[in-house]
Amino acid sequence: MKLKEFFAGSLRECLEQVRSDLGPDAVILETKKMKTGGILGLRAKDSVRILAATGIAVTDSPNRTERRESAQVASPEPEIRAAVAARMVAERYAAASASSGQAREQRFAAVAPDPQELRYSPDAQRTIARLEDEMRALKQGFDVVRAAVQTRQAPTPVREPAAETPRIPAELEARLRAADLSETLLAALIRKLPDLSGWGPLAQTEVAENALRDLMAARVAVSGALDPVPGTRKVVALVGPTGVGKTTTIAKLAAQYAMQHKKRVGLLTMDTYRIAAVEQLRTYSQIVSLPLEVAHHKADLVKALDKFDDLDLVFIDTAGRSQKNTSQVEELRGLVETACCETHLVLAAGTKLRDMQDQVKRFSRVGVDRLLFSKLDETASYGTILSVAAESGIPVSYLTTGQKVPEDIEVADAMGLATTVMHGACVGV
């Protein structure tokens, strides 16, 4: 038997060390999260310690059972004693590790059981007797199968076959369903999960969670922040259904690029349908001292863009449209084509999956370059936005997490979005 400690910054890294060093048959004896480094507890980093061992007997899979039968092991006693020794090592190591004053070498010296103790200890003798009974029962079953094969008769069932190990822990699957992840995406993710049967029950959930997070992140495309090229004007239009927060989102982006990135920014609104929509954007423009133009028709749009020819960024606010109103969507398409702009479809995170899928499908006729998800602070499940992003393949640009201007907006990050879906909490909320 080989017993070894492993340390890493995350459970996944630690498990990879176990597999690399001890192989796929390693048995996890103990998993512990701890803090390391820092001064007086400050800036300490999370780390994981795993105690693992090889040479410990585990429940046989069908393949291992066949190999053991073909080998016809005459005496199982050495294997049984190794299992008992490993169990006693694990129990004693846990007790010895509880005393922080002991050095690591002293703790290891304290855990190894004496061979005579294994032979004469009452607890060890009882364990050996029980395991010997189990081995004899298995051998009897093998004899029945062998005899049936030799006589070409159907073997008499000895015991029920072991249930197949599920590809995902039930608790984790329930969490993903509660996050409103689409059934199609969930099934595809589960099919891609690695085989978890080689890990212990305590490690399976964390291994599956890390794997699912990576798989989800790999399916989401992100565009990164707006990156205007010096000397070239970039025009960005926000389109989408009514009430998703397009005007507030434009105010956040305009304020950030004007005040933080020192860009020359202009605002242009075509939302002349909604009451006080122009005044709302005019208020924002006055606070940040940005020029504002209003366009009622295509001709007004062309004139306004000519006035902004020397700017770095121009944000266009459009009127909210129902995706089911074909004529309004076509009208919006004409305005977007006239502006020759980058189009971001704004979708509210709390929208039902089917409705959001329909919005993406119908607004795609306008020409959608990016997805921008708003109001993440108004929902408790985020699987819908990840599902739509993954299924559409359209890159995600930004996420908004509140009403504060300009703070509550973030550049979309695939891994961050996957983590948000896994844990049901949005960063900044």
Image (tube, rainbow, N blue to C red):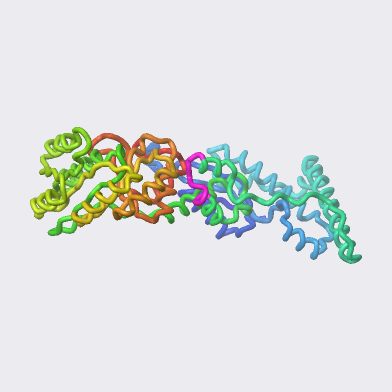
Q: Which residues are magenta?
A: 178-186
Q: Position of residue 365 (x, y in %)?
A: 32, 54
Q: Position of residue 373 (x, y in %)?
A: 34, 44
Q: Is residue 159 found inside the magenta-colored segment of the image? A: no
In the image: residue 291, left or right of residue 227: left
Q: Is residue 181 found inside the magenta-colored segment of the image? A: yes
Residue 328, relative to residue 60: is it above or below?
above
Name the foreground residue: 80 vs 265: 265
Quadrant that contains the C terminus: top left
Quadrant that contains the N terminus: bottom right
Q: Position of residue 135 (x, y in %)?
A: 82, 52
Looking at the rendered structure, the number of numbered marks drawn on it comes to 0
- Which quadrant of the figure has residue 277? top left
Name the foreground residue: 113 vs 294: 294
Residue 370, relative to residue 427: is it above or below?
below
Does residue 227 show up? no
Q: Position of residue 164 (x, y in %)?
A: 68, 51
Q: Report the residue at 70% width, 47% height from top.
A: 113
In the image: residue 237, left or right of residue 300: right
